[in-house]
Amino acid sequence: MKKLLFLLLGTFICSSQSNRFVYDVVYKKDSTSNNLTRENYNLDITGEDLAYYNRIYYINDSVFAAKNQYGGKGYRLTSFLTKKINNDTYQNYEYIGDVNFYRISETPKQQWTITDNIKKVDQITLQKATAKFGGRFWTAWFCKDIPFPYGPYKFNGLPGLIMELYDTEKDYYFKVIKSDKIPDDYKRISLSNAISNMIPADQNKLNKLKIELFNSPFKYVLNGRLSLSEGKRLQLEDGTILTKEELKPAEENERKKIRSFNNPIELDKAIKYP
């Protein structure tokens, strides 16, 4: 936050510059468990667009710039968002295990109630606002001194950057922990590659695809869409490593994992698996 304070006092932010805000995100995938997941997400804001994405993409781009190769340690494909500055529509790129991303165009809006509650964090003045969105009730603390009407994920519409955000149950908690100026020559290589392989979809199609994946968790490998050559193994997100022959017997355990992710940010979009 000290770097962010310096950025503010030095009037570093202006519409002609590109800025990156790093959010610490702590969330609960399974509402029946006390286990929490912690990740960092970047919110990039330029004069043309914004992008909200897992910081592993940024790390992967850094590895590529240094070594001219993809796939840094821990790299995996995850969903992300983009939006043109002069347009209210977000492009939501969902990854569900296929070789492609699925793009859903959405115009999310929150009806914020701005309160008179003020607090200071590291000498930065924050103001409280509340809203209902995605089946949850949210509290946001925004900073008028950072004149961007955006925040993490699809949250937008306040007269300043959302610095802190959480739902009533604290199942999701977002907080800005760092800010940077984006170099003029920076390119979102990983995101651009993902976008080039996208397939337009809507929520109904995406829900259907997720049910299909639940019914056959490794269908993209078993049907040849994702190649797993002889002697190669598939590493799952939790670190489990399987040969192609081991995939079919492992399906039920994978279904349990999918079913346990019952607590998405937009709770009203949670899939009801069989």
Image: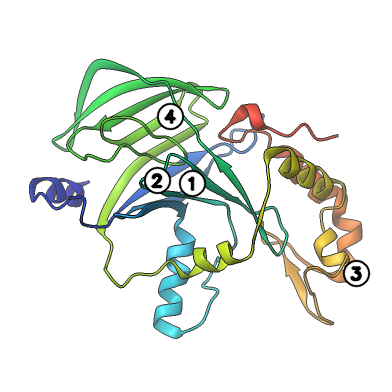
Q: Where is residue 253 shown, x and y percent of the image?
A: 82, 49
Q: Earlier along the polypeptide chain: callout 4 or callout 2?
A: 2
- Tell me whether the residue at label 4 lies in contact with that at label 3, contact meaning CB atoms closer than 8 angstroms: no
Mark 4 — residue? 166
> Label 1, on which residue?
38
Which numbered tag is attached to residue 245?
Answer: 3
Q: How was the colour assigned to the protein in this rendering?
A: rainbow
Q: What distance separates the C-alpha of mark 2 from that of mark 3?
A: 39 Å
Separation (CA) of disc 4 from disc 3? 43 Å
The mark nearer the N terminus, 4 or 1, is 1
Q: Quadrant of the C terminus?
A: top right
Residue 141 horizontal/vertical position (percent): 30, 29
Q: Residue at x 17, y 38 (%)?
A: 122
Question: What crowding class fits label 2: few (fewer than 14 Cα within 10 Å), some (14-19), or many (20 or more)?
Answer: some
Label 2, label 1: how far apart the Cα atoms are: 7 Å
Marking on residue 24: 2
Q: Nearer the viewer, residue 188 or 179?
A: 188
N-terminal of the pair, mark 3 or mark 1, is: 1
The disc, 2 or 1, on the residue closer to the chain's N-terminal end is: 2
Whole-percent x and y of residue 96?
69, 52
The amino acid type found where label 4 is placed reads: Tyr
How many numbered discs, if any? Answer: 4
Q: Amino acid at mark 1?
A: Arg
